[in-house]
Image (cartoon, rainbow, N blue to C red):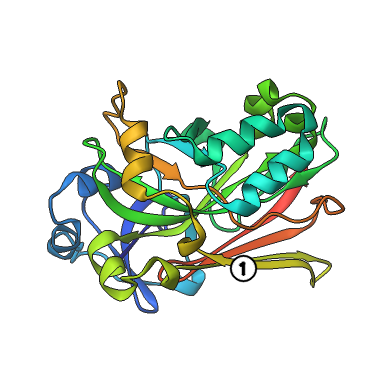
Amino acid sequence: MKIVKYLDAAQTPRTGWWDGDHIRPLTLSLFPLLEMSDPAEVAKAHVDRDSDPIPFASATLLPPIEQQEVWAAGVTYTRSKAARMEESEAAADCYDRVYVSPRPELFMKATPHRVSGPDQPLRIRYDSKWNVPEPELGLVLNSKLQLVGYVVGNDMSSRDIEGENPLYLPQAKVYDQCCGLGPCIALREEFDAELPNRTDIKIDLAVRRGGQAVFTGSTDIGEMARSFDDLIGYLGRDSSFPTGAILLTGTGIIPDSQFTLLPGDVVEITIAGIGTLRNPIIQS
């Protein structure tokens, strides 16, 4: 089952069940739904019988988030390790060591107001000249840090800022419109049944400029060096998340050093079993 946030005819944010070509409005919001032991059954029981389904193609989707913090893991793929070592010679050894260390790199990526949903703009920093998208599988966690679903994520990154000094990572990663989430939350039970093997979870990235693809890349979760349980376990050490969290699991697709995003580009990230997150790129 896929759960979305969208604007209804009165431009009011609603939670809905993406059912084929339509969205079925629900009578409860996202957070309480994700807190339930069986969110899919609860969603079916809370379909709003007084509201007509709306065509998915004409819906205005919002990021599937309410009050959750967004966190991210880094250097979880070999490609990510290599890229980070290339961009920062001074800190290359740090990235090499964290890749094999028991403790992963984790950082806070975004608060809800910094998150963009489907077809909403993502930003590249005005003080950066080397910016890339980072396509990532997001783990949707409830307040008990139980994995309840999955989402497509884009961890926008200013590589020249981080490369200048690793201590600049928060500035390279965290700013307005720095994170894309969408198009839906694929609830765990059905997703895991359809894609039982990590190698089945394919991630594809395309960057389009003037309608033409200027970069494409693919990977799968089987290339990830860490388990979901490992990342979630470290996230929860001495930290509570009363409204839940979304944890991005790192990227295995990074354009080479000659590529940077430009205003007007469109980034498309597709993850099997979830859908496609599409965002135009802007700059101040």
Closer-to-camera residue (89/168):
89
Q: Place residue 267 in its image quadrant.
A: bottom right
Q: Could you say where residue 108 lies in the image, as x and y percent from the top left? A: 50, 30
Left or right placement of residue 145 versus residue 154 in this view: left
Front residue of 70 and 221: 221
The residue most toward the bottom is 21
- Whether residue 252 is visible: yes
- What SS does tag 1 mark? strand
Dividing the picture into quadrants, the one containing residue 195 is bottom left
In the rendered image, the vertical position of residue 154 relative to residue 47, given as above or below: above
- Report the amino acid beneath label 1: Ser
Picture residue at 69% right of the left edge, 41% below the top: 84
Q: Residue at x 18, y 66 (%)?
A: 49
Q: Is residue 132 above or below residue 45?
A: above
Q: Residue at x 80, y 27 (%)?
A: 164
How many marks the image carries: the answer is 1
Considering depth in this image, is 115 or 91 the residue closer to the camera? 91
Q: Position of residue 124 (x, y in %)?
A: 74, 41
User: How many residues crowd around disc 1 within 10 Å: few (fewer than 14), some, or many (20 or more)?
Assistant: some
Would you name the residue on which mark 1 appears? 218
Q: Quadrant of the C terminus?
A: top right
Q: Is residue 284 visible?
A: no
Q: Is residue 6 left or right of residue 40?
A: right
Which quarter of the figure is the N terminus placed in? Answer: bottom left
